[in-house]
Amino acid sequence: MTMIDTGYETAAAAEPEERDVPTASAPETLSIAAALTGALDDALAADDRVVVYGEDVGPLGGVFRVTDGLAAKWGPQRVWDSPLAESGIVGTAIGMAMAGMRPVVEMQFDAFSYPALEQVFSHVAKMRNRTRGRVELPLVIRIPYGGGIGGVEHHSDSSEAYWAHTPGLTVLTPSNAHDAYHQLRHAIDSQDPVIVFEPKRRYWTRGEVRRDEPGTDWNRARVLREGDDVVLLSYGPTVEVALRAAELGAEEGLSVEVIDLRSLSPFDDETVSASVRKCSRAAVIHEAAQFGGYGAEVAARVMQRNFHWLDAPVLRVTGFDIPYPSPKLEEFYLPTAERVLAALDTWEW
């Protein structure tokens, strides 16, 4: 199997770069944003049932330019701007999916998706079960999420727990360009609804994309760094934090394993449990508030399945239990490598 350079060796770039949308199957070095553009472009070419729409995704190309150039290439019948009405965006996607289309819709920012949740909880997630499998909903909802870009509160939420908690939804979150391309292609090909959470502060991080080699299965976690003392469970924007913590920990003699969960629902118990049983200590990292967060479910699953292998309780290193702060304060809210190591120091080793 060809090893994929996910770009973690180079820190995330702060500014958008000049991007080339992938047009060939040869390995390319792309940002996450460009990889997503390529996935949408290839999906539009592969299947004329695929349509892309949302707020400003047409001529503007989206606020993060993920749909840049697609409206000009595919025209307003395939890529278009929607009204500013998230419930309507998802509601129309449900209807199109029921009629045989494959809509891919964008929620412009994480918290903008909340008006659409009634459609998601009541219909998107339940349609297959409600109809005993007779009606499929092959639709994708893309959600830029997380902080780190200087956005205000409803532009920086990490709402993945709401969606992962809902049976009937597959919830993915890439942390690198290769996964961004392949997870979105998988989502569009799926016969069931898939939610793709895109870590917006990682949009401009570059890595190698091999479009013909998906690599690790889309719903399996990946061990990014091996270690023996503790395993850090991360996803999306916190993968980089975990890897940085592992580097700093190594300087202090700590052997840290890092896992990128990649799929929040379904959850890869097999890969995670194997690492937990090897290291006997685990911590989960996410940006959302801790109380009732995704990390609570991860900690519970890890302890229920691996209790007799654990030397210490599973830790959670998260955002604080407050609304997302103003841009000037977000550096104190977001988990950092230093906070991760400080949390590990609370254990009795």
Image (cartoon, helix red, strand yellow):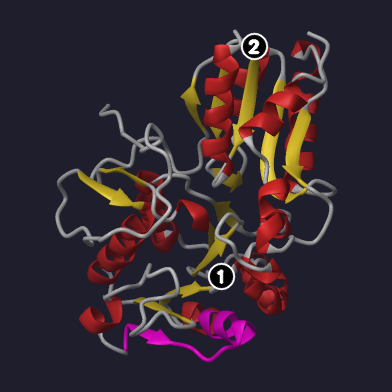
Q: Residues within 10 Å of mark 1 (few under 14, many from 20)?
A: few
Q: Is residue 297 left or right of residue 220?
A: right
Residue 234 visible: yes
Residue at the (56%, 70%) spot, across then down: 134
Q: Secondary structure at mark 1?
A: loop
Residue at the (23%, 45%) spot, across then down: 212
Which residue is nearer to you in this view: 266 or 156? 156
Assess whether residue 135 is covered by the magenta stretch: no
Give the residues drawn in magenta, as a range: 77-93
Residue 326 location in percent, x, y? 71, 63
Of tags 1 and 2, the one toward the viewer is: 2
Q: Vertical placement of 57 versus 25: above or below?
A: below
Give the spatial CA distance, label 1 vs label 2.
49 Å
Q: Which residue is mark 1?
A: 134
Assess whether residue 79 is covered by the magenta stretch: yes
Q: Vertical placement of 336 versus 342: above or below?
A: below
Residue 221 location in percent, x, y? 52, 34
Q: First in sequence: mark 1 or mark 2?
A: 1
Residue 151 location in percent, x, y? 61, 66
Residue at the (31%, 34%) spot, across then down: 5
Q: Secondary structure at mark 2?
A: loop
Residue 95 got which mark?
A: none
Residue 193 visible: no
Residue at the (61%, 11%) spot, across then down: 252
Q: Mark 1: which amino acid?
A: Arg
Please tell me in which quadrant of the rendered image residue 27 appears: top left
Q: Which residue is mark 2?
A: 229
Please tell me in which quadrant of the rendered image residue 110 appears: bottom right
